[in-house]
Image (cartoon, helix red, strand yellow):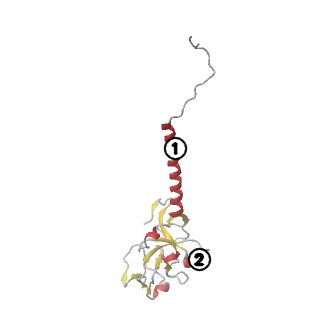
Amino acid sequence: MRKSKGLSFYRRRKKISTAILHEILSYVLGIAIAAFLAFVIVYFVGIRTSVIGVSMEPALYNGQEILINRFIYKLSNPKAGDVVVFLPNGNQNTHYYVKRVVAVPGETVQIMEGILYVNGAPVEDDTYDLIADAGIAEHEIKLGNDEYFVLGDNCNSSEDSRSGNIGAVARDDIVGKAWFKLSEGSNSMGPIK
């Protein structure tokens, strides 16, 4: 007996192959891992903040947003030339300060006749003009363990380690390294030098 080839209201169910199911699960797992890594990177490495004031011009401008790497100083210590972000005297009720490290623990700092001296030698750097106000660095300062001396690149318009209410910055007060500047008007986006 032959089956009729007429209308049939029964449809064959398509089976999902294990290869397709495996591919779907691998995509879902890949997306979950990417989301987790993005969260970890943003939480541990990147904090976004804005530069307040003109003290870091021309490298960073007032209102320019930067990313802070909180993780790097868990592996190493700040070096001279690093742009660090810190809370002066650990004060949680103030904004982040962004300044450049000019001297590290154990070094001596002094500003004489507008020139910055580290360990008795003048710092030959085009970043710093003649410094009009030596502040507390008028007399030689020996940095203790875990103390850093910081200056703004535009040091004649900067409140930094020369100021008595900031002084040398303690290692524990440093939040992290300013490592990436975001585009702000005509300013370029990229790593901070």
> Label 2 is placed on what type of residue?
Asn
**Which residue is drawn at the image coordinates 55% and 30% (left, top)?**
14
Residue nearest the observer in this picture, 59 or 88:
88
Residue at (60%, 24%) from the top-left corner? 11
Residue situated furthest right in the rendering: 9
Q: Nearer the viewer, mark 2 or mark 1?
A: 1
Q: CA distance from mark 2 to mark 1?
A: 48 Å
Amino acid type at image mark 1: Leu
* Secondary-structure class at tag 2: loop
x, y (%) of residue 133?
49, 83
- Disc 2 to disc 1: CB gap under 8 Å: no
Callout 1 secondary element: helix
Question: How far from the left and from the top, in percent, is residue 180?
Answer: 47, 62
In the rendered image, the quadrant that contains the C terminus is bottom left
Would you place residue 99 above or below residue 2 in this image? below
| Residue underneath mark 1 | 25
Task: Say which residue appears at 43% left-offset and 77% top-offset.
Answer: 102
- Residue pointed to by mark 2: 91
